[in-house]
Amino acid sequence: MMNPEFRRNLWLSFSTHRLIAMPALLGLVFATAAYSLSNPGKALYITASALFILIVWLWGAINANAAIIEEFRDKTWDQQRMSALGPWTMAWGKLFGATSFNWYGGLLCLLALVFSGIAVDQPDWPLDLFSLIAGGILLHAALIALNLHAARFEMRLIRRGGLGWLVIAFAVLFMQGFIWSARSPLSGVWWGITIDNQKFFLLASALLFMVCAVFAAWRLMSNALQVRTLPWAWPLFVIILTVYFGGFSRKESADNVFLLGFFIAAGLSYLMLFTEPNTLLVWNKLRARRQAGDWRGWLADLPLWPTTVLLAFIFAMIAMPTLTAGLSVFPLVTALLLLRDACIVLFFSFAPNARRPVSTAILYIAVINLLLPFFFGKFGWSEVAHFFNPYFSLGSRAFFGGVGGSGIDLLIAGIHAAIALGFVAWRLNRAARQ
């Protein structure tokens, strides 16, 4: 039986007029391109590729973005959540149903691309074909996943159009990669493997991240439909990014892959920390799960950011021996400050009648890291400035003059983290007594 969500979107996307208009307009454009230029086959190939990007990547991404936005605007999302459809059925029904008309036009463009590629003996047309398809699915799935995540913490963003502004950024990124691979057929080394064909490498990369995006859309749809999942996918994504981008490191600096993994884990930890709900209700539920010994339920209810904070500490410990003496404690210092910042967010999130806790926490983090060190540094109290920001070099008036290279920096960061943990524990105990 056909997916009901997919079928519903087909009825919304197609009409007799649209079924006829799309091939008629595309045929007119293809004929104009083929007969107005000196090389009809090459012109048709380029035109088909460009129209696919326009119809599937750009227009299709807008429709994929609207697949979630319109459900909230029309107040039909709760009805869908109560339906009998599972997360995967709902995810692929929206992914390909909301963009079905775009894929209808995209298929016609791909047929023209294949025909012209064979006609002009274009050797790498299969690579272009699958790269265009993978890029389109990646864009659509990423926007559905991002909007599902955004709906958990910022409904105003959803009502204002969601994350559709990312459509242009993603499309431009893929377009640049597509053009770059066409102009530079030879280049680079990845994990010691010479990249002889950048188009093939671009296709492999697009397929990898396409799978990640589709998987993310399914997992977030599971969360939206209240299907319990364990938080292993997010740290796995960090590891995938580390392996992928770490492959571009020079052979003599391959040890820096662990440092790169630390930065990716820390960056994505901040991203989830500032976007996930961190209400007192969530953490009270975690405490109840722990006290009952329900560790699987505890993991299922755990926010994602603690998993990558833990991974950041692991990468920091592994990276420390690979760094020079002046930088050896830098990853661990930064990991402790990440823990401190997470506790600051939790402290304000656990406050009674908390309003905009993330914005308040970011303000205080900026004051501690920037304003207070700058203030005390200006008056010559470098030791005090150094206490507030371990990256503030002793005896220096410039920020980040000496990057966390001594044991005192580690001690200061540990004190920051301990104080922040103490405030969070106090807030939790106070809430438990009320």
Image: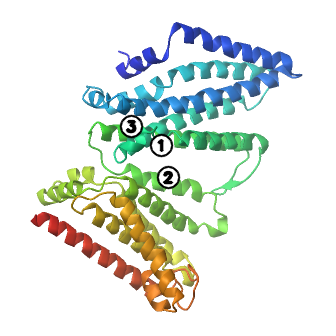
In the rendering, which numbered label is found on residue 240? 2
Mark 1 → mark 2, Cα distance in angstroms: 9 Å
Please give the name of the residue rendered at 73% of the width and 32% of the height, measured from the top-left corner. 124
Secondary structure beneath label 1: helix
Please give the name of the residue rendered at 70% of the width and 19% of the height, measured from the top-left corner. 112
Q: Which residue is mark 3?
A: 218
Quarter of the image for residue 312 reads bottom left
Quarter of the image for residue 125 reads top right
Query: Compared with residue 296, is residue 115 higher up or lower down, i.e. above or below?
Result: above
Secondary structure beneath label 3: helix
Quarter of the image for residue 136 reads top right
Residue sitting nearer the eye, 273 or 201: 273
Please give the name of the residue rendered at 61% of the width and 57% of the height, measured from the top-left corner. 247
Secondary structure beneath label 2: helix
Residue sitting nearer the eye, 139 or 231: 139
Q: Mark 1 and mark 2 in contact? Answer it, CB < 8 Å.
A: yes
Residue 195 percent across, percent down from the top left: 70, 49
Give the amino acid at mark 3.
Answer: Trp
- The answer to whether residue 138 is left or right of residue 235 is right
Which mark sits nearer the N-terminus, 3 or 2? 3
Residue 296 percent across, percent down from the top left: 22, 51
Q: Which residue is mark 1?
A: 212
